[in-house]
Image (spheres, helix red, strand yellow):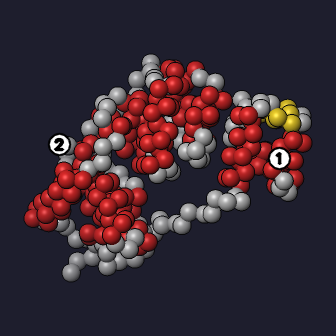
Amino acid sequence: MKSAMTRKLNQKEIQAFQTTIWDYYHTNGRKLPWRETSNPYLIFVSEVMLQQTLVPTVLKKYPAFISRFPTFQDLAEAPFSDLLRLWKGLGYNRRALNLQKSSQIIVEKFNGELPRTVEELDELPGIGNATACSIIAFAFNLPVVFIETNIRRVYIHHFLNQKDNIPDSEIIPFVEKTLDTKNVREWYWALMDYGSYLAKIVPNPNRKSRHYNRQSTFAGSDRQIRGQILSLLLESNPYSKKKIMKSLNQDPDRITEILMDLEKDHMIKIKGSRIELP
């Protein structure tokens, strides 16, 4: 049997695979609010939210967020504290800041219209190639090729399950060959839904990926402390450094370092002993 690097799928294999995916989707496809719109802004927001957060959590936060910020312009002009307050619970708060910075660029450079190329989207803060491609696929139904967790799971399970340490470069040709180029948007929805289903019924194929990493423990992490600091500032802005130290009851040197990192990321401003949101 040819190796995965050189193996080529024949038309029969492609059709059989597509039939499996479509059959599952047409019976079990998830109805999600960002799938029920063609508004590029709403799709953009959902893709950023879904970067590192599970669907059920995003479902709880998405409606209020887009109600408060219905356009790129609204998001670009909003006080960061308003944005952060509605983002709370989604985690990785830097994404909220990057989302606002991206909105400001889109308003200033593209007249409030989402760019239609991967290259332009990839230059926005916090938008890597995979997210740029997913936005292009879902917002404009254009035939781009990308991988995310559920998609990776599907292709390893079906085509590479006998291998280990699989780089994405080995998976991409399978994604490209089996892509439904006429119905890109729904095809990727179908892959993701089928991948979510596989996660419940088979041992995780993604463990065979070279890019697989267990998520680090949140409790007691710097990420948790960053979130706690921002929560304190949402309750009372500004906040003294002394009160932050007392509230968190952590090593002062560690808190100081985290505060400096937050300022470096433009999440807070440090003015002497006073800490505040930008």
Residue 186, compared with residue 237, is above or below; it is below
For the point 28% across and 58% down, which residue is it? 194
Residues under numbered marks 2 and 1 in contact, where contact means CB atoms less than 8 Å apart? no
For the point 47% across and 26% down, which residue is it? 67
Residue 49, compared with residue 27, is above or below; it is above
- Is residue 170 something one can see in this rendering? no
Q: Residues within 10 Å of mark 1 (few under 14, many from 20)?
A: few
For the point 46% across and 29% down, which residue is it? 66
Q: Secondary structure at mark 2?
A: loop
Q: Amino acid at mark 2?
A: Lys
Residue 69 relative to residue 273: left or right? left
| Closer to the camera in the image, 235 or 182 | 235
For the point 74% across and 43% down, which residue is it? 229
Disc 2: which residue: 182
Which label number is shown at residue 247?
A: 1
Task: Give percent across and percent down for residue 236.
Answer: 77, 32
Which residue, as the protein is rendered here, is positioned at the far left?
A: 12
Q: Quadrant of the N terminus?
A: bottom left
Task: Give percent across and percent down for residue 169.
Answer: 37, 62
Of badges 2 and 1, the one in the foreground is: 1
| Closer to the camera in the image, 181 or 201 | 201
Residue 234, compared with residue 196, is above or below; it is above
> Which quadrant of the structure image shows residue 193?
bottom left
Task: Give percent across and percent down for residue 133.
Answer: 37, 44
Q: Earlier in the sequence, mark 2 or mark 1?
A: 2
